[in-house]
Image: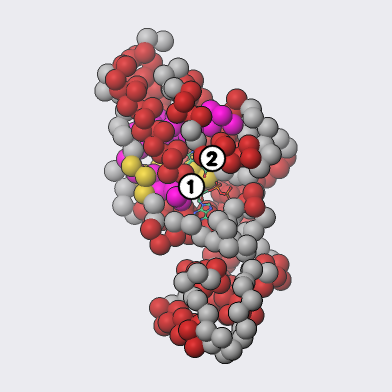
């Protein structure tokens, strides 16, 4: 079984990325051949600062390793170290109906938020399909917002198979039910583009500030509160033990505790939860060429697979 996922180096990773994609991806590395990459070509649709892109890409590699990606099991590499994906993306684009891309929520959302309508942004899902199909991937762990892109990938694969014979496997998304959508400090989906994130490796003071800024309703301290609909409780559920969770849920129901107290407890649990990752991160940073070595080894493994699949594709389409 081959498992594949990618993450854009468009900014600092946050706990939505961690619980939605990185943690499930790390758990899956023991179950098959895992390939995880840093989608730097995709990030070019929003980031046009070469220094920042390079820096972010390394930082995503560092953070992913710190969170538990084991480079002896999973290959970690840069998307752009396998430039064959852009060739495959072109070929896939020739069979992709415009309507399929026009329906993509992510494209429409980005335009609504003010992004310029570039061809790259529009064909983003075609490159993503190439990322997935070029490794004959079986399973793709992602957060719920990427589900539609997986459907597009499957549609493109079906179209290719109908046109050129049995070329591609149909990949399955793996969406972790409990962490489908991790809320941000404004209780909307946590996202780098909404400025509502809590970073995985933010400084202590800043992280506390972010947690204390979570929006709440105006229920008075003494009144009972609804835990299930509270972003504080939802986030706490991700990092607290079952007993701690039950205690907090009971206090929400009973009333008498203010949101500020709950937030303080959330911060403490969150800070504790990521402590081992922070330690590992410091240890990695102390080894100067470690990240470069991991990325080079990962790229080698990924290229070996991609070359084979591309030979098959080129043969099938006649180039
Ligand atoms: P962002 O929205 O912050 O730009 P990305 O689009 O780079 O995040 O997402 C990287 C991965 O993390 C994807 O698999 C995505 O589904 C997942 N992810 C991002 N935000 C969340 C969230 N709030 N809840 C669950 N998963 C998320
Ligand atoms: N579009 C994904 C995101 O924004 C990143 C990505 C690019 C990806 N290619 C992929 C994810 C292939 C899974 C598989 O999060």
**x, y percentage for residue 257?**
58, 87
Quadrant into which the N terminus falls? top left
Residue matched to label 2: 106
Relative to 172, 104 lies left or right: right
Verify whether residue 180 appears in magenta. Answer: no
Residue matched to label 1: 145
Observer-nearest residue: 194 or 316? 194
Residue 88, above or below 184: above
Question: Label 2 CB, ligand 2: below 8 Å?
Answer: yes
**x, y percentage for residue 141?**
40, 48
Observer-nearest residue: 260 or 287? 260
Most extreme residue toward the top is 318
Seen at 36% across and 13% down, the residue is 317
Tell me where the magenta segment starts and ends, as one range.
121-144
Q: Would you identify the image quadrant in which residue 80 lies?
A: top right
Verify whether residue 129 appears in magenta. Answer: yes
**x, y percentage for residue 50?**
71, 36
Question: Label 1 CB, ligand 1: below 8 Å?
Answer: yes
Q: Classify mark 1: helix, strand or loop.
A: helix
Q: Classify mark 2: helix, strand or loop.
A: helix
Label 1 close to label 2 by CB (< 8 Å): yes
Seen at 63% across and 37% down, the residue is 111
**x, y percentage for residue 128?**
48, 34
Residue 251, above or below 46: below
What's the colour scheme?
secondary structure
One can see residue 226 in this view:
yes
């Amino acid at each position: 079984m081959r498992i594949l996922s990618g993450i854009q180096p468009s900014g600092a990773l946050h706990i939505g990325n961690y619980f939605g994609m990185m943690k499930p991806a790390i758990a899956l590395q023991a179950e098959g051949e895992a390939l995880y990459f840093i989608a730097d070509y995709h990030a070019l649709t929003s980031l046009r600062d070469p220094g920042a892109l390079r820096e972010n890409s390394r930082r995503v590699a560092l953070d992913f390793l710190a969170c538990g990606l084991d480079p002896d099991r999973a290959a970690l590499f840069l998307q752009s170290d396998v430039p064959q994906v852009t060739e495959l993306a072109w070929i896939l684009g020739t069979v992709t109906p415009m309507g399929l891309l026009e329906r993509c929520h992510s494209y429409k959302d980005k335009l609504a938020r003010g992004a310029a309508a570039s061809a790259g942004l529009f064909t983003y899902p075609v490159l993503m399909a190439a990322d997935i199909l070029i490794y004959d991937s079986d399973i793709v762990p992602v957060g719920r917002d990427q589900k539609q892109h997986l459907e597009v990938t499957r549609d493109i694969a079906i179209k290719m198979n109908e046109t050129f014979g049995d070329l591609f496997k149909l990949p399955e998304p793996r969406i972790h039910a409990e962490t489908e959508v991790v809320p941000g400090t404004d209780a909307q989906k946590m996202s780098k583009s909404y400025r509502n994130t809590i970073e995985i490796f933010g400084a202590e003071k800043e992280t506390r500030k972010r947690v204390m800024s979570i929006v709440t309703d105006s229920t008075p301290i003494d009144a009972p509160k609804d835990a299930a609909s509270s972003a504080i409780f939802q986030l706490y559920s991700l990092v607290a033990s079952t007993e701690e969770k039950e205690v907090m849920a009971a206090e929400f129901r009973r009333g008498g505790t203010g949101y500020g107290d709950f937030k303080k407890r959330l911060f403490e649990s969150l800070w504790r939860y990521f402590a081992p990752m922070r330690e590992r991160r410091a240890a990695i940073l102390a080894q100067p060429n470690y990240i470069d070595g991991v990325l080079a080894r990962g790229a080698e493994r990924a290229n070996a697979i991609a070359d084979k699949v591309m030979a098959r594709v080129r043969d099938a389409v006649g180039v």
